Image (tube, rainbow, N blue to C red):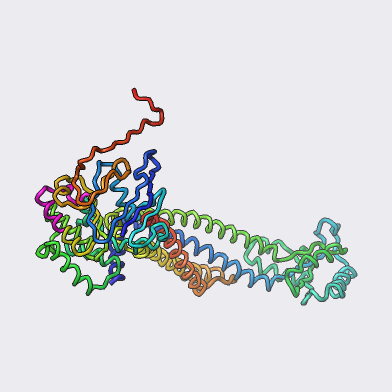
Amino acid sequence: MIRFDSVSKFYASNSRPALNDVSIEILKGEFVFLVGASGSGKSSFLRLVLKEERPSKGRIHVLGQDLGSIPNRKVPFFRRNIGVVFQDFRLLPNKTVFDNVAFTLQVIGKSKGFIQEAVPDTLKMVGLASKTARYPHELSGGEQQRVAIARAIVNKPAILLADEPTGNLDPSTSQGIMTLLERINSGGTTVVMATHDAGIVDQMQRRVVELSAGQVMRDEREGGYVTAAVPVQEFSLGGTGVVR
Amino acid sequence: MRWSLIWREVGQGLARNLSMVVSVVLVTFISLTFVGAAILLQFQVNQMKGFWYDRAEVAVYLCSPVSLGTCNQAEASQEQKDAVQAQLQSETLAPYVESFEFENHDQAYTRFQEQFEGNAVADLVTPDLLSEAFWVKLADPDDAELLHDSLSSLAGVESVVDQRSYLDQIFSVLNAASITAVAIAVLMLVAAVLLIATTIRLSAFSRRRELSIMRLVGASNRFIQTPFVLEGVLAALLGSVLAGAAIVGIVYFFVQGYLSSTLTTISFISVDDALIVVPILLGIGALLAAASANVAISRYLRV
């Protein structure tokens, strides 16, 4: 489903790589937590999967396609198979809940009939069937995130990427969002979720990939947020080897 | 579905940036009016060339008592006139000469009186002051140089003048006006292109949330860029239509309505010529707008 072969990513402004020689494989139907400190490379990982960035080194395969060989003008069609959810929801403030979700289908050229069927179905699934005519500012944070999730899955993507989807929500609301993501996952959608929320990771007992300074520190099935093993931290001394 | 959505986006974009759109319309209007005026001036020059070059003749002026230079203020003798006529009829020149006629002092005087009727100089001139001349019509007006070479050295010939040299001065003035119009038009078009690009960037910036979501969910590049290109093209087309109307109006009211009735001897361009220019202006306007809008929006399409 997603395969990284020795992928490194350097940004021009930073001499330290965002991802350093990462090799990982995520299978169809898996639920994967991506954990690690800020700047550990979680977001870079998700952006690479979405082909918003190119790897500096290595190869990435997503959905059986080599991302390096997809021409720019085909990238939009590739993205239709991937849903994305963000910490800050990114809803359109001047559109209703229904229109926010329908917008996704409109801009990829789906028919009116299809939209009239798919959008209410999806909104019902995320539990917002009664709030289709509301505007985002009339909803709570948890409800807004549900709209964002509905928008991400309305086109039935094979992969759902979530970048700290519970980052702005209180614990009980987060719990509801996780239940929803779990239900989406049980429908066969691969879910990759970057998070800082230790409670959720510990409770879910799913696959956990920990990144630190761009490297995979551990990859555990049914793992928790913190591992029992002593974490190995790498320090760079800037090449001089002298510590004052 | 798709197109109704795109047109709605276009309408929203135009309404949101109304002041910028108005300025784009005005700048394209003015610049394309100059382009149209330059094209019309060229039409006018060509039309006058066609009209006058056919009628232009070469004048072989003979010496008169007031002629200076080689003539020594002596009237050309009958032998000298015969020599010029013989030269014109000779085998070397005959193929180039379509016809010629001799104009004596009295005929020249009559023509002069007609041309300068009402002018004070008409009262001062007497027939003997005006040169006699052979008026030569050439088969090909471009061969005037040939006639000049073979006749101007003959005794009794004061000068050989190609009438086209008078016309060329008029044409060079018209050409200069046309080049000036083109230069102004080019400057204005550069401004128009930059303005369109800025307008489109503003429009894209005000819709950046929608754009980022469109890119995220996989809207095709063409779908994203079409509303913006249409926005630029519509604004520019509106300006082009105004410019076309201005060009037709200028020809109809000023050239045909005023100039033609005032200067009856000159043939002027007609409204038909102006109607040829209109689609050219529309094409230039639409093409430039589409190109600059495309370039402006491309930075929002990078993946």
* Image point (70%, 67%), residue name: B112
Could you tell me residue B179's position as x and y percent?
A: 57, 58
- Decide which of B286, A176 is in the foreground and name it: A176
Q: Is residue B62 above or below residue A176?
A: below
In the image, taking residue B166 as reference, residue B59 lies left or right, namely: right
* Image point (62%, 65%), residue name: B118
Task: Point out the residue furthest to the front here.
Answer: A229
- Decide which of A82, A168 is in the foreground and name it: A82
Could you tell me residue B17's position as x and y percent?
A: 30, 57
| Residue A179 lies in the magenta stretch | yes
* Image point (38%, 31%), residue name: A238
Task: Point out the residue furthest to the right here.
Answer: B79
Q: Is residue A149 above or below residue A236?
A: below
Task: Point out the residue furthest to the top here.
Answer: A244
Q: Is residue B194 above or below residue A12?
A: below
Q: Quadrant of the C terminus of chain A?
A: top left
Could you tell me residue B240's position as x and y percent?
A: 42, 65
| Residue B235 lies in the magenta stretch | no
In the image, taking residue B184 as reference, residue A116 lies left or right, namely: left
Q: Is residue A231 visible?
A: yes
- Decide which of A163, B96 is in the foreground and name it: A163
Could you tell me residue B165's position as x and y percent?
A: 70, 63
Q: Quadrant of residue B169?
A: bottom right
**Count of residue discs:** 0
Q: Is residue B230 visible?
A: no
In the image, taking residue B73 as reference, residue B207 lies left or right, namely: left
Task: Tell me which segment is drawn in magenta.
Answer: A164-180
In the image, taking residue B221 as reference, residue A97 lies left or right, namely: left
Q: Quadrant of the N terminus of chain A?
A: bottom left
